[in-house]
Amino acid sequence: MGRPPRDEWARHWQYEKLPGLDLLRARYVRHTFRRHSHDGFTLGAVSGGVEDVSMPDGVISARPGSVVMINPEVPHSARAGTPEGWAYATLYPSLDLVAEIAAEVTTLRGTPAFGETIVHDPATAELIRGVHQAAEAGNALAADSLLRVAVARLLDRHGGPLPARAHRDSGARTAAMAKALLEERMAEPPSLERLAGELGTSPFALLRAFRAAYGMPPHTWLTDARVRRARHLLEAGSTPAEAAVAVGFTDQPHLNRHFTRIVGVPPGAYRRERAGR
C-alpha cells in the first residue's frame, strides 16, 4: 500500500525527549484498523467526525470531547463512524511509563489499568492534543508536563489495578502453548490442524480456546504479532523488504497492507520517522 488518499493523512512517530511514548495524529476516511492489540496503553482524543471502535464487549463511538482508553493486550479494531471519517490525536504510553506516573500521583498498587473505555472529558482531550502540539514544536518541557497531567487525571478518575488473570483451565493453557509455538515459528507457522495435533487437541477446540484467551483467532493474532515484530525491526534499521521476510510475510506489499491496517501508516513512513529522531 502506498500513500494514503489525499483526504487522508497520518503521522506515527516518537519524540526522542519523551521516551516510552508513541504518537499518532491522523485524519482517516476510508481507512480501517483491523483487529489488533498493543503491548502498552492507547489514549485517543477525536477532534472531528466519529470513530467507531470495536471492543470485546461491543462498539463505542468516539466523538469530539471524548477520550478513549484501551488497556494493554485488549483486542480492538476501528473504522469511520460517519462518511466524513474522523480526525484524532492518540498517545501510546508504555506500561512502564503509566506505572511510573501511577506510583507518583496515585495510591494504586500493582499494574495500573483504566476501568472505562470511553469518557466525555473535553479538558483531557485537549491535553492529549496539546502533547502532540508541544512535541511537534520541539517543546519538551510542555510536552512532558501535559503528558503527565493527562495520564494522572485519567488514572485519578478512571484508574484501578489491572484485573488478575482468571485461573487458567486446560483451554487457556492450550492457547498459551499455541501462542508460544506461533511466536517461535512466526516465519513458517504450522497449519491449524498441525498445530492442534502437536498440542493434542482438535482444530475447532483450539480455535475456541485461542479466541477465548486472546480475543481473536490464531491467524489474526499471528498477523498482529508479525506487525509488532516488524515494527521493532524497522526501528532497528531494517528495510521494509528485510522486515517482511524476517517475520514471514510473502513480500513487501503483503507487509505494507497489513502494517498499514494495524499501525495506521505504511512501514516506509514509519521507518523514516524513526530514522529522523
Image (cartoon, rainbow, N blue to C red):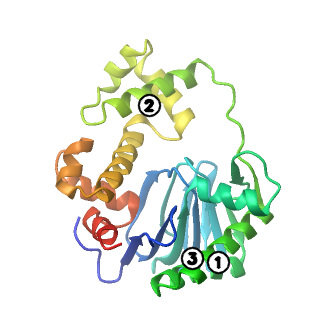
Which quadrant is home to the N terminus? bottom left
Residue 120 in the image, given as x and y percentages of width and height: 72, 73
Within 10 Å of disc 1 (Cα), the crowding (few <14, some 14-19, many 20+) is some
| Residue that lies at the very extreme toward the right in this rendered image | 107
Three-letter amino acid code of the residue under disc 3: Val
Residue 183 vertical position relative to residue 50 in the rendered view, above or below = above
Three-letter amino acid code of the residue under disc 1: Ser
Earlier-in-chain disc, 2 versus 1: 1
Residue 47 visible here:
no
Label 3 sits on residue = 46
- Report how far apart the C-alphas of labels 2 and 1 lie in the structure: 38 Å
- Report how far apart the C-alphas of labels 3 and 1 lie in the structure: 21 Å
Q: Secondary structure at mark 2?
A: helix
Which quadrant is home to the C terminus? bottom left
> Which residue is more in the foreground, 92 or 257?
92
Within 10 Å of disc 3 (Cα), the crowding (few <14, some 14-19, many 20+) is many
Label 2 sits on residue = 179
Q: Is residue 116 left or right of residue 217?
A: right
